[in-house]
Amino acid sequence: MNLLKKIVKAEFSLFWLIAGALAFFAVAQPAFFSYYNLMNVLKNASYMGLMVLGVTWVIAANEMDCSFPDVAACASMVFAYLAVNGHNLWSAIGAALLSGMACGLLTSLLVVRFRYHSLITTIAVSTIAKSVAAAINGGMPLSAPVIKSASMYRFINGDVSGIPVIFIIVLAIYVVLFLIQERTKYGQYVYAMGENRQAVREAGVKEGRILTGIFVTSAFFAALAGVLMVFVVYGSGQPKMGSSFFLDGFTVVFLGAMVLKLGKSNVVGTFLGGIMLAMIVNGLTLMGANFAASQFIKGLLLVVGIVMVAFGQKRRRGKAGVLKYE
């Protein structure tokens, strides 16, 4: 009985959603469980999960980042442009990542130094990143066939014992960030800022450094996802990722708040949220669902995630509105 009570706790609601989705597709579309299709699900979950990995901590700190899809687009275009024009792939990747980090630094400068709201700031930075991406090739995708002859391309698109390499890479990154989140003071400060910013200031913690760290981290992983998508998905730089990944990204992060740290975005939750969304999109595609149906389901999942976040926050507050620390 005690085990049953633990399993049905709200902190495990995302696991139940995943189990329900698997059961549904087992009946509605058995082809979903083919090995090839499941590996595609893992690939799709990988780059989506990586793109919003840093956004997880931004939301946890009670801030907002709307720029991640356009930062990814900008990085993909910078990488493709340099690769096509004969630059070493490692230097092209480095430049693409630096372009993303520059966006994160600009965001942190405006938020920390000038006290602008992070929502407005990241919308502005998103516009800048989008403009840079469009300027590189006149707003058109930039094909980079040169990468297909590189050993790096074969490695990233390869597998280890049948598991996609890109999934293994992203899983390793998630493990590292999970350890930082759970075992370091930095991780504790991120969540403390989301719960009681004033207490963090009074404790002498450098609030600006934490904010700079989370915004640069968010932009870095968005840029890395943009580069990897050139290798794995598109084979080209894509200047228009915003409309495709904006809703998906926030759906993943808010779904992730339905597991372990109820009401708080967290690394484990975002990882599982990415898998959940990839499963839903893949399964609906196999069933022949149209675009409108897919968008409706995504929107519904986002609403569910937001409601659970609100529920978790309310549960952690006492009757007088005083936060109860877990």
Image (cartoon, rainbow, N blue to C red):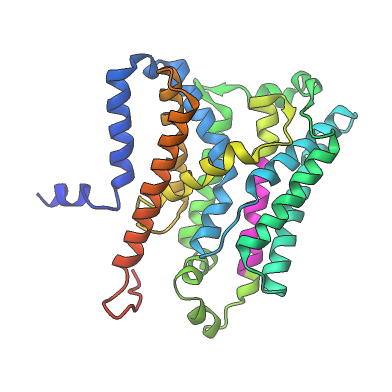
Instruction: Please identify the quadrant where the C terminus is shown.
Output: bottom left
Residue 205 sits in quarter: bottom right
- Quarter location, residue 79: top right
Left or right: where 225 falls relative to 44: right
Magenta segment: does it hold 219?
yes
The residue at the far bottom in this view is 202
In the image, 60 versus 4, the foreground residue is 60
Q: What stretch is highlighted in magenta?
A: 210-224
Prevailing secondary structure class for the magenta stretch in the rendered image: helix
Vertical order, 12 against 325 (above or below)? above
Q: Can you give x and y, in whole percent of width and height, for residue 309 in the image? A: 38, 57
Front-most of residues 89 and 78: 78
Where is residue 115? Give x, y as percent.
67, 74
Q: Where is residue 2 in the image (x, y as percent from the top left)?
A: 12, 52
| Rendered position, 214 above or below 170 | below
Rendered residue at 44%/41% (across/down): 299
- Residue displayed at 34% across by 17% down: 29
Q: Does the magenta stretch include residue 215?
A: yes
Q: Which percent across, then down, holds residue 288?
A: 43, 17
